[in-house]
Amino acid sequence: MEGRLGPQTVVLDHTSGFEGLLFVDDDLLGEGVGDTPDSYAYDGNRVRKWNVTTTNYGKSWAAGDIVSCMIDLDEGTITFCLNGQSLGTAFTDIKMGPGVAYFPAISLSFKES
C-alpha cells in the first residue's frame, strides 16, 4: 500500500463537545476517538492527540475553523492542519500493509450532532 490521502476537512460550527478528528481502522467498535491501537485523533478542544494514550499537540480550535487530516502511506504518518496550516506530524509508524484500511471519522460528546 502506498500513496497519500488528504485533506479530509471538517468546518467546526461549535467547539464544546467535539472530541476529535481522526483516521480509524475498523476496530473502533463503540470506543472513542483514538482509544484503540489503530485509531488516531486530534482534539483541538483539549489541544491533545490520542492513540490509546494522549499527549499535547496542535492548537486550540474555535467555531468556524477548518480542520484537515492527512495520511501519508509512503511515510506511515498522520498530520493535522488547522485553517490550512500544518500542526506538524501527529503520528508516525502507523500500521500499514495488506488488509489495513483507514477511514476518516469524528466522535462527538453526548447530545452533540
Image (cartoon, rainbow, N blue to C red):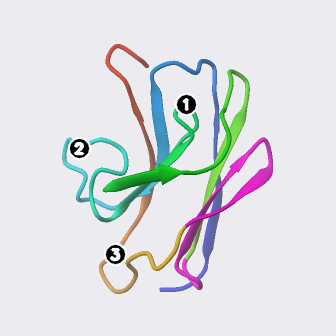
Residue 97 on image: x %, y %: 37, 86
Q: Is residue 25 above or below residue 1?
A: above
Q: Which residue is mark 1?
A: 45
Q: Residue at x 41, y 51 (%)?
A: 54
Q: Amino acid at mark 2?
A: Glu
Nearest the eye: 96 or 52? 52
Q: Which residue is mark 3?
A: 100
Residue lying furthest top: 111
Judge depth for marks 1 and 2 and give the one in front.
1
Q: Residues within 10 Å of mark 1 (few under 14, many from 20)?
A: some
Residues under labels 2 and 3: Cα distance? 19 Å
Q: Is residue 13 above or below residue 103?
A: above
Q: Amino acid at mark 1?
A: Asn
Q: Secondary structure at mark 3?
A: loop
Nearest the eye: 99 or 73? 73
Residues under labels 1 and 2: Cα distance? 19 Å
Residue lying furthest front: 56
Would you say the magenta stretch is mainly helix, strand or loop?
strand
Which numbered disc, 1 or 3, marks the residue that appears first in the sequence?
A: 1
Q: Is residue 41 visible?
A: no
Q: Amino acid at mark 3?
A: Val
Judge depth for marks 2 and 3 and give the one in front.
2
Relative to 20, 61 lies left or right: right
First to last magenta residue range = 73-90
| In contact (CB < 8 Å): disc 2 and disc 3 | no
Which numbered disc, 1 or 2, marks the residue that appears first in the sequence?
A: 2
The quarter of the rendered structure image containing the C terminus is: top left
Residue 68 on image: x %, y %: 66, 49
Residue 110 on image: x %, y %: 32, 18
Q: Which residue is mark 2?
A: 31
Q: Is residue 107 visible?
A: yes
